Amino acid sequence: MTLIATLESPRLILRQWQDDDLVEFAALCADPQVMRYFPAPLTRLEAAALVGRLRGHFNEYGFGLWALERKDNGAFIGMTGLLNVSFEAPFTPAVEIGWRLARRHWGLGLASEAAWACLRCAFSQLHLDQVVAFTTQNNLASQKVMQAIGMQPDTEGAFDHPRLPPDHPLRPHVLYRIDREQWLQTVRG
């Protein structure tokens, strides 16, 4: 296993987590707007624990959710990356792509740009056959990012997230997929 420490895109560096990222990361995880499609905003302690789990994923698998930094000013803006899905579902085992950006960086195409870098890593460096993404049915912004990076909805793959109670409004999820061949077709234009 080789650690993939950094990736780059035209405007971003996807890098390993640094201790001083926690202040900004905790702030974005505490923002109710950023977290509206998650069960609840995170406390600073919960955000720190999440960073610890993300570092552990890198240590175990060599990839994970990278910290996002803007090249133009060095600002930490969130995270994007690849994770092994940690629950059982009809589509697992699988590697998912995900992102979470601070609100002031929304609408600039940065999530899609970082996600493209992650897909390039998934198919060119990690040699994965497929990557999935999922979100709540109402999270149209994330679904637009999934579509922008060439992912296709798996209409038969919609599922109820097993970590949420049966009556939770965020439990129904949509599933998107992209395989290496679809990615290559998208890259070739």
Image (cartoon, helix red, strand yellow):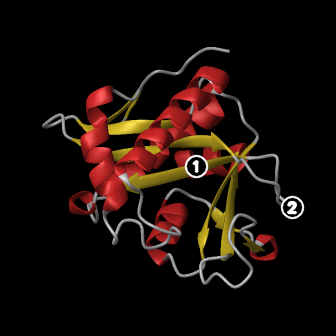
Q: Label 1 crowding class (10 Å Cα cut-off): few <14, some 14-19, many 20+?
A: many
* Residue lying at 82% horizontally and 55% vertically, measured from the top left: 88
Q: Quadrant of residue 16?
A: top left
Q: Would residue 10 be seen by someone viewing this image from the given angle?
A: no
* Residue type indicated by callout 1: Ile
- Horizontal and vertical percent position of residue 171: 66, 76
In this rendering, the answer to whether 186 lies above or below 33 is: above
Q: Would residue 166 be seen by someone viewing this image from the given angle?
A: yes
Q: CA distance from mark 2 to mark 1?
A: 17 Å
Number of the label disc, if any, that sits on residue 90? 2
- Taking depth in this image into account, of 82 and 26 the one nearest to the observer is 26
| Residue carrying label 1 | 97
* Residue type indicated by callout 2: Pro
| Label 2 close to label 1 by CB (< 8 Å) | no
Q: Quadrant of residue 101?
A: bottom left
Using residue 134 as the reference point, say whether residue 33 is left or right of it.
left
In this rendering, the answer to whether 85 lies above or below 13 is: below
* Residue lying at 60% horizontally and 77% vertically, measured from the top left: 170
Q: Quadrant of residue 146?
A: bottom right
Q: Quadrant of the N terminus?
A: top right
SS of the residue at dot 1? strand
* Residue lying at 24% horizontally and 57% vertically, measured from the top left: 105
In this rendering, the answer to whether 187 lies above or below 8 is: below
- Horizontal and vertical percent position of residue 5: 46, 21
Q: Residue furthest right?
A: 90
